[in-house]
Amino acid sequence: MKERVILPRDELPHDNQAIEWWYFNGFLKGKNDYAIMTCLFKANTEKVNLKFLRLPSKTVYFSHSLLFNLTTKEIKKEILPIVIVSEDSYKKKDLFINYFYPLRKNFVNYEIARYDKDLKIKTRYFDLLLESKKKPLLEGGNGYIDLGTKSTYYYSYTNMKAIGYIGNDYVRGKIWHDKQWSEQGFMKDSWLWFSIQLPNNTEIVCFDYKGKKMASVTYPNNKQEHLEAEFTLINNIWKSEKTGLQYNLEWNIKIGNFDIKTKPILKECEVNFGNINYWEGPIDVVVNGIKGKGFMEFLAKQKPSKINNILNYNKSIFEKLKFYKS
């Protein structure tokens, strides 16, 4: 049954979903210029359709975090195949998730939590406090999208003022936050996705999910519009030495009256997780002559070569923790 996304209620986790995630990206400035991404995933191992997540627990969490130093061109990646959520997570009225990676010798706690009007995100790389400057964007108009082979609930905070630290570097900037959940798991998925932020406080999200092409726009006055999108590849293809996969990195996008050109800031942004490999990184954009920033995510067709290794690795974590119940 279709429902409208209701906030802040839907910041909290949902029962009986195959997959759910809390995703953040953005650009920050301190002594250096940075871009960041972090995402916490909650998966139902019986529904998610990922072989390497068929573990002796109904619910499993994992997280991906990226730190891009745009000044030095250094990229740090932390792909955690299993994280443990603390006992007091979800016990507060508002969103509160505290989690950690059990096999690290030095303890690091990670956090995604709401404190009144602010959201806090904390990872190994950064500790940030976020304040939304616009009302949330409900993709598709009410936050429910029919993708044909499956459906998803989806909303975004597209314009969040950020302050905090990367290491001991005090930073300020702008963050984008997505939340999605779906009753259907991965089904030979592939997609191309963009978040775009312009200096005039217009933000755009657009994607091509196996031929389903959509866009949502939020304007400076909080007016929202939901449109079709067309994607045209520019000849800028990067091939990963690690996986042999090719990623299309530069695009022309047409959305209503918007003419968008995208270009990667860094190229070597492949993320590897089990048999899933995807490109995730910061981009420069030009929208009707206005320069902006954004992120691109490109999930390519996958290779199964690493499934057994990751499956055995994840099981070994569960055995060490005796973590057999959700």
Image (cartoon, rainbow, N blue to C red):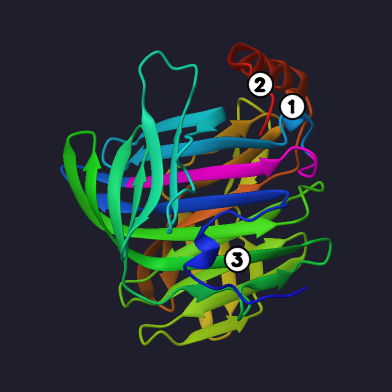
Disc 2 marks which amino acid?
Asn
* Mark 1 neighbour class, 10 Å CA radius: few under 14, some 14 to 19, many 20 or more: some
Distance from label 3 to label 1 (Cα)? 27 Å
Q: Are marks 1 and 2 in contact (CB under 8 Å)?
A: yes
Q: Which residue is mark 3?
A: 154
Q: Nearer the viewer, residue 222 or 285?
A: 222
User: The magenta stretch spans which residues?
Assistant: 35-49
Foreground pick, 127 / 219: 127
* Place of residue 290 in the rendered image (x, y in percent of width and height, measured from the top left): 36, 75
* Residue at disc 3, secondary structure: strand
Of circles 3 and 1, which is in front? Answer: 1
- What number is the disc on residue 314? 2
Residue 37 colored in magenta in the image: yes
**Mark 1 is on which residue type?**
Leu
Please tell me how crowded label 2 is: few (under 14), some (14-19), or many (20+) other residues with Cα within 10 Å: some
Q: Position of residue 226 (x, y in %)?
A: 60, 82
Q: Position of residue 282 (x, y in %)?
A: 43, 50
User: Are discs 2 and 3 less than 8 Å apart at CB?
Assistant: no
Gap in angstroms between the C-alphas marked 2 and 3? 29 Å
